[in-house]
Image: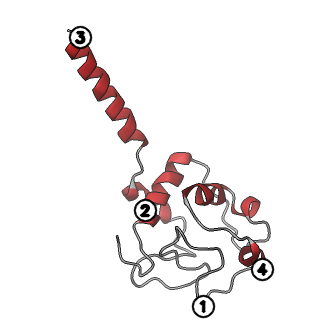
Amino acid sequence: MKLLVSAAALVAVLASQSANAQDASAGERSFNKCRACHQVGETAKNGVGPELNGLFGRHTGAVEGYSYSAANKAANITWDEATFAEYIKDPRAKIPGTKMVFVGIKNEKEVADLTAFLKQFGKDGKKM
């Protein structure tokens, strides 16, 4: 009986962990909110916003050929998961004066999924 209870506890823990895991497919659906301004992938180009290939580890204002706001250039941020999560929830609060007029994504699971989707793309736009 003790083994059966332990197995059931293990299944419950694993199920809760997978429910909290990042889901790149869900993140791709969430990225639809971003597509009007941003692109990712091998053919990505700057648009209203900069292309987002290789975002994580990149410094603010660093995409060649994109005209950033002075606020973004001066922000001195290197994008990582925590910084991106804070930014995407309320871009204008994180970088006052940014040109980004997006209202933000408040749901933490959605932010984690979007992060997982974006992290797939290297600087060259190829999925890693």
Screen quadrant of the C terminus: bottom left
Which residue lies most toward the top here?
1
Disc 4 to disc 2: CB gap under 8 Å: no
Label 3 SS: helix
The amino acid pointed to by label 1 is Gly
Residue identifier under label 3: 2
C-alpha span from label 4 to label 2: 28 Å
Residue identifier under label 4: 70
Q: Residues within 10 Å of mark 4 (few under 14, many from 20)?
A: few
Residue identifier under label 1: 65
Which residue is painted at 77% across and 80% down in the image? 70
C-alpha span from label 4 to label 1: 15 Å
Q: Point out the tag, 4 or 3, that comes first from the N-terminus.
A: 3
Q: Measured along the vertical axis of the image, is residue 90 above or below residue 48? A: above
Task: Give residue 23's position: percent from left, percent from top.
Answer: 39, 52
Task: Give residue 69's position: percent from left, percent from top.
Answer: 74, 79
Disc 3 to disc 1: CB gap under 8 Å: no
C-alpha span from label 3 to label 1: 63 Å
C-alpha span from label 2 to label 3: 41 Å
Which residue is painted at 74% across and 63% down in the image? 92
Numbered badge on residue 117: 2
The amino acid pointed to by label 4 is Ala
C-alpha span from label 4 to label 3: 63 Å
Label 2 SS: helix
Which residue is painted at 69% across and 71% down in the image? 100
Label 1 SS: loop
Q: Measured along the vertical axis of the image, is residue 3 above or below residue 45? A: above
Closer to the observer: label 4 or label 3? 3
